[in-house]
């Protein structure tokens, strides 16, 4: 099918190919769920299970009709086509190579389960069809909604006026919730066959191997990226984040942070002097400066996210899990410094360092009444402002 200057190609596999690939990959076979009319634990082990008509019917089911869901079928098709080699000049290219060279734009799975998911989820949004979510969006999104569902149901027990009186029970509640979520996530991982997900994870198309070697498991030639080089890049990236030296980009980023924080301090002092001269309350300067600080944090967060993404791509991770873990670590460190540097300044250094800025005693950044009050203004502005900003992104932007 052709649309404008883009070509779309649909790739399907018949049932025999699907079964062959499943057996080759040693994947578990998933059949349609059959509800038993009894509890095998209660009736004992002497029951002749193989003579039960339901079990006999299950064993006689044609596996070609009841085998697998669309997600597993798509995975089987992808595993088959990624092994196909295409001649391109003197090279033999595979699917990931074609995408890296921009010979193909992208590949994706048809949205076959969307209508079923919408019909089951839209009428009753409080009931999570986790298996359908997992089939359409994947395990990561399904686990996210499973966590939201578990947190919502567990939170209803304590979401009342007694929470304030018995606030010390929150720590016990959070511990129990964490343990219950571990059990639920392990149950879902077992049912969905993702316990060994990282061992069986496919290679990222952007991964660029530099060498080849003989696999000790399969005995075949495989692409290889030296582990020492990967560790060296990760160590160097962490040095960039923690020490903020040796790379010009990171040095400029730190300079932006220093300029931003310094500018906020000077701005706060100027507003405070202006407010006192005109008879305004000194709290006005704290509030305006807190808003200004919030805007700078939001702006710099996007800059830090871009730098973190570039560093993580440079590290050349093989799988999506490794890539995401490294990216999350960088974003956490960057956002921690960006979000809480002003709080550390107010809490520990404002009273000592803010008495006279640029030698002008009228421009001072000392605490209004108490540094705790200034810290409260900053915390309230950051937390409420970030909530509004995040809700705006979630609800109004695609």
Image: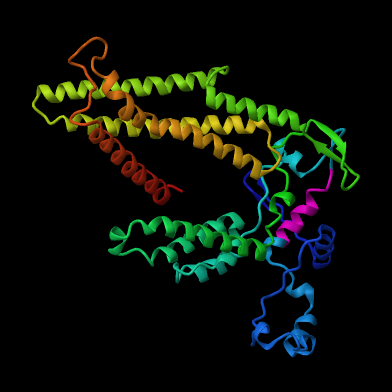
The answer to which quarter of the image holds residue 308 is top right
Horizontal side, residue 17 vs residue 341: left or right: right
Res. 143 in view:
yes
Horizontal side, residue 328 vs residue 57: left or right: left
Residue drawn 68% across the image and 64% down it: 70
Image location (x, y in percent) of residue 361: 19, 13
The answer to which quarter of the image holds residue 225 is top right
Image location (x, y in percent) of residue 183: 58, 63
Q: Residue pushed farthest top?
A: 359
Q: How is the image coloured?
A: rainbow
Q: Which residues are magenta?
A: 73-85
Image location (x, y in percent) of residue 94: 80, 42
The answer to which quarter of the image holds residue 60 is bottom right
Residue drawn 80% across the image and 62% down it: 22
Q: Name the foreground residue: 302 vs 188.
A: 188
Q: Within the magenta stretch, is there residue 296?
A: no
Horizontal side, residue 395 vs residue 353: left or right: right
Tell me the chief SS of the magenta region: helix
| Callout count | 0
Image location (x, y in percent) of residue 178: 51, 57
Q: Name the foreground residue: 279 vs 44.
A: 44
């Amino acid at each position: 099918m052709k649309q404008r200057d883009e070509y779309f190609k649909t790739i399907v596999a018949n049932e025999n190919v699907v079964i062959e690939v499943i057996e080759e990959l040693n994947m578990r076979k998933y059949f349609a769920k059959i509800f038993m009319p009894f509890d095998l634990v209660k009736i004992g082990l002497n029951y002749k299970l193989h003579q039960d008509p339901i079990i006999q019917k299950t064993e006689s089911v044609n596996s070609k009709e009841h085998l697998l869901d669309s997600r597993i079928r798509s995975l089987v098709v992808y595993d088959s086509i990624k092994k196909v080699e295409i001649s391109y000049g003197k090279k033999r290219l595979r699917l990931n190579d074609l995408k890296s060279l921009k010979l193909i734009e992208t590949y994706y799975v048809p949205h076959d389960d969307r209508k079923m998911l919408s019909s089951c989820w839209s009428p009753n949004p409080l009931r999570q069809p986790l298996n359908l979510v997992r089939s359409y969006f994947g395990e990561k999104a399904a686990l996210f909604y499973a966590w939201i569902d578990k947190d919502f149901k567990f939170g209803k027990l304590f979401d009342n006026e007694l929470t304030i009186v018995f606030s010390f029970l929150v720590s016990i509640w959070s511990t129990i919730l964490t343990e219950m979520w571990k059990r639920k996530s392990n149950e879902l991982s077992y049912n969905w066959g993702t316990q060994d997900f990282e061992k069986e994870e496919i290679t990222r198309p952007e991964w660029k191997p530099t060498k080849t070697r003989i696999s000790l498991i399969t005995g075949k030639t495989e692409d290889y990226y030296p582990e020492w080089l990967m560790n060296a890049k990760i160590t160097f990236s962490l040095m960039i984040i923690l020490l903020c030296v040796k790379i010009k980009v990171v040095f400029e980023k730190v300079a932006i942070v220093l300029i931003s924080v310094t500018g906020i301090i000077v701005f706060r002092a100027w507003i405070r002097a202006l407010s006192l001269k005109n008879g305004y309350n000194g709290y006005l300067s704290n509030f305006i400066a807190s808003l200004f600080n919030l805007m700078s944090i939001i702006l710099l967060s996007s800059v830090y996210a871009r730098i973190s993404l570039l560093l993580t791509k440079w590290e050349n991770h093989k799988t999506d899990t490794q890539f995401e873990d490294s990216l999350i670590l960088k974003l956490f460190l960057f956002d921690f410094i960006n979000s809480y540097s002003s709080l550390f300044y107010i809490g520990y250094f404002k009273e000592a360092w803010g008495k006279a800025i640029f030698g002008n005693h009228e421009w001072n950044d000392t605490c209004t009444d108490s540094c705790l009050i200034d810290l409260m203004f900053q915390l309230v502005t950051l937390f409420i402002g970030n909530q509004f900003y995040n809700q705006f992104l979630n609800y109004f932007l695609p």
